[in-house]
Image (cartoon, rainbow, N blue to C red):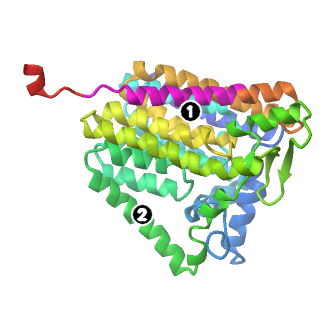
Amino acid sequence: MTNRGVLWIAFAFVHIGVAALGFLMPNEPMGDVYRVYEPWSVAAWQGYAVVGVTEEWVYPPLALLPMLLAHAPGTLLGSYTIGWAVLVTVLDAVAFAILIGRGRSRGRTVAAWFWLAAMACLGPVGMYRLDAVTVPLAILALLWLIGRPWLASMLLAAATWIKVWPAALLAAAFIAVRRRGAVALGAVVVSAGVLGAVISAGGAPHALGFVAGQTARGLQVEAPVSAPYLWGAVAGIDGFSVYYDVELLTFQVTGTQVDTVIAAMTPLMALAAVAIAGVGAWKAWRGVRFVRLFPVLGLALVVALIVCNKVGSPQFHTWLFPVVAFGLVIDRRRWAGPGILVLGAAALTQLVYPVLYGGVLVAESGPALVLTARNLVLIALLAWMAVRLVRLPVPVPARVRAV
């Protein structure tokens, strides 16, 4: 059997296994699909309410599209949740086929195995969340950044209008790719199309409502910044606790000066992103090549969005997969270390959710320790990428070398 055939067998095994685990594991990791995605999409199909158009929504407006599309396989198979898993698998299959090509590139093969391993380590939450739709789009975009930068930027822009995080990769592409005009044009065309469709449907007041929705959120229990409050709850300190936000359908933490921390996190995340992008722009201006600059810059920006975020949902870990896979395609030796770190963090994430999540919510020390370890791995990854970015060697001009 060819290497390509083995990869496709592994692809089927991982996707079927992860999809099935969603129905078997505790805390229903596929619950968001039938609790929120299905009702939102049914309401839109029936004309009752179109989230992001007729009312405020926590997601960008294009996020409704995959929720609607999942009804096609869902209707045939008798389950919207299974339909969602099929939709994600089909999108992954397209990106996987482009990634492995003819199966002759060792870098692409390693990247493909990494992606499958990462999916298995993270488990069902990586499939049964909206983020799963953006991962194959991002992988395709990164593979096409050099040859088709306009198409790559359109895919990243579309993914951004589904879930905001690919904007980090779009920013890194604009900095690192020489054909910046093509990158900018592709993003502008897609953004104009999405906003135009929403406005023409009468949704102008809600088109950017997701921005305000994220800004107003509290500290989610899994976020790195929440660790002191979680450990305060573990220690039984008065005023520190984990509670359920009925509006956002998520568990958050509270304690001393929590409002101050909440208010500081969005500016801190923006500052971190600007600082990283600034270093990346300086390196690009000094002549650092795309193949060295983009993967480091892209991963640094994406990890910063996770580490400095007051929301710490477990599916955020999928954001790391595309850029690490791309790094492995380019230079598997240089990116083996970050890949291993991402796999370890993914495994810890699945251990936290859904396996130990009940213990996290009641502030037990064991689950809190596992969650803290996962967050420390992410912080270490951010520090590593920041240092690597700063240390990227700047090419010496030929005339200087001649002297």
Give me the residue at 8% from left, 27% from top. 399
Mark 1 sits on what residue?
11
Res 253 visible: yes
- Given the image, on which type of amino acid does mark 1 rest? Phe
Which of disc 1 and disc 2 is earlier in sequence? 1
Give the x, y percent position of residue 63. Answer: 59, 60
Residue 65 position by quadrant: bottom right
Res 223 visible: no
- 223 shown above or below 46: above
Q: Is residue 228 left or right of residue 235?
A: left
Q: Is residue 177 left or right of residue 304?
A: left
Mark 2 sits on what residue?
190
- Given the image, on which type of amino acid does mark 2 rest? Val
Give me the residue at 53% from left, 42% from top. 92
Residue 50 position by quadrant: bottom right
Give me the residue at 65% from left, 40% from top. 126
Dot 2: within a 10 Å radius of its alpha carbon, few (fewer than 14), some, or many (20 or more) residues?
some
- Compute the Cα span from label 2 to label 1: 31 Å
- 33 shown above or below 387: below
User: 43 or 311: which is nearer to us?
Assistant: 311
Give the x, y percent position of residue 162. Answer: 56, 57
Quarter of the figure that contains the C terminus: top left
Give the x, y percent position of residue 397. Answer: 15, 28
Q: Is residue 25 left or right of residue 182?
A: right
Magenta stretch in the rendered image:
373-394
Magenta stretch: residue 254 in it?
no
